[in-house]
Amino acid sequence: MIPRTIAQAVVGDGGLIAWSDDFDDAWRTEIERIVEAFGLPRGIAAPDGLFTVPLLRRHVAIVNVAGRRYRFLILSRKLYDVIPDPFAIADRFPPKWDGPLPTLEWPLEPLPQRTVAQLDAIFKHGDGPFLLGACQALVDSGRIALAREQPQSSLFRDIWNLIPDSIRRQTSLATFAYSNALDFSLLAMPTIPDGGIIGYLSDEQTRDYPESKYERELQTAVEAGDQNSVDRLLARRSSAETLRLAVWLVLAATAVSIAMRLLTR
């Protein structure tokens, strides 16, 4: 059974301020590296934001930023793969900035279904071409960096609602960051270097991203009010998952072939 516990830690300028009883001291150095790599300049208070990063090999950190403090929610990679929505997780467990910090536990329930009505409202009230381009780019393993003066929590939440769970699992984001040293897949920054960031789409490039199968089928299903098709699209495998499945099937077939040869000798 997948453990449902979520550890907590709060970090300030002087390092760790508070942590829950299940905090693993082996995480301390990596957490301090993540905070430094976030790039917040000295003397600057960051606006409220959210980012996600892998924590070592087997965990994921969901980090709330406010002023010069960082609240880490640390969950196993296995649990995050079941509930790959940092916005929903952070909403359920609002930051507590002073100790003592309790150990948290995700309830035995799935994430809420993303409904046709919900996605239709996103398309109607948002920048449709940008949203469609962004979700298709991320499905294609692209990366997006936007120049913004404020955190893009609402926009990134909308994009997150439009991409399949398989893409959510492999995508890291920062609603606002001061550097890309943490190698986010989707981020907003106060400034982007002239010429952009190598390997990342700009705002304009995202909006003009070539139409392809996923965004076309999602838009068609939403416009038709077809919840079953929406559910199928959001549950689709990523190309990486499809490749892994193919490899396992080849290995399994090879193992069966070898076993049959040994048995017939």
Image: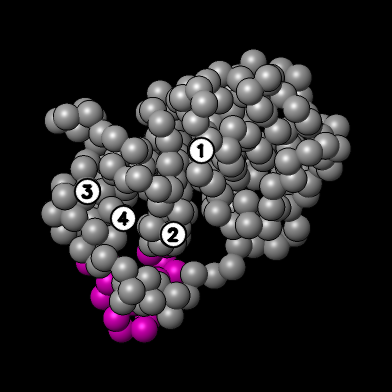
The numbered dot on residue 203 is: 3
SS at mark 4?
helix
User: On the image, numbered disc 2 is attached to which residue?
Assistant: 154
Residue 88 seen in render: yes
Mark 2 or mark 4, which is nearer to you?
2
Q: Earlier in the sequence, mark 3 or mark 2?
A: 2
Tell me if residue 2 comes above or below residue 61 in the rendering.
Answer: below
Mark 3 or mark 4, which is nearer to you?
3
Question: Separation of disc 4 and disc 1 at Cα?
Answer: 27 Å
Residue 135 vs residue 19, the one in the foreground? 19
Mark 4 or mark 1, which is nearer to you?
1
Neighbor class of circle 4 (other Cα within 10 Å; few <14, some 14-19, many 20+) is many
Residue 261 seen in render: no
User: Is the stretch drawn in magenta largely helix, strand or loop?
Assistant: helix
Question: Separation of disc 1 and disc 3 at Cα?
Answer: 23 Å
Name the residue at 55% across, 54% down.
87
- How is the model colour-coded? one colour
Q: Using residue 222 as the reference point, say whether residue 112 is left or right of it.
A: right
Question: Separation of disc 3 and disc 4 at Cα?
Answer: 13 Å
Name the residue at 54% across, 70% down.
113
Tell me if residue 218 comes above or below residue 192 in the rendering.
Answer: below
Residue 191: x and y in percent read 29, 35
User: On the image, numbered disc 1 is attached to which residue?
Assistant: 46
Q: Are marks 2 and 4 in contact (CB under 8 Å)?
A: no
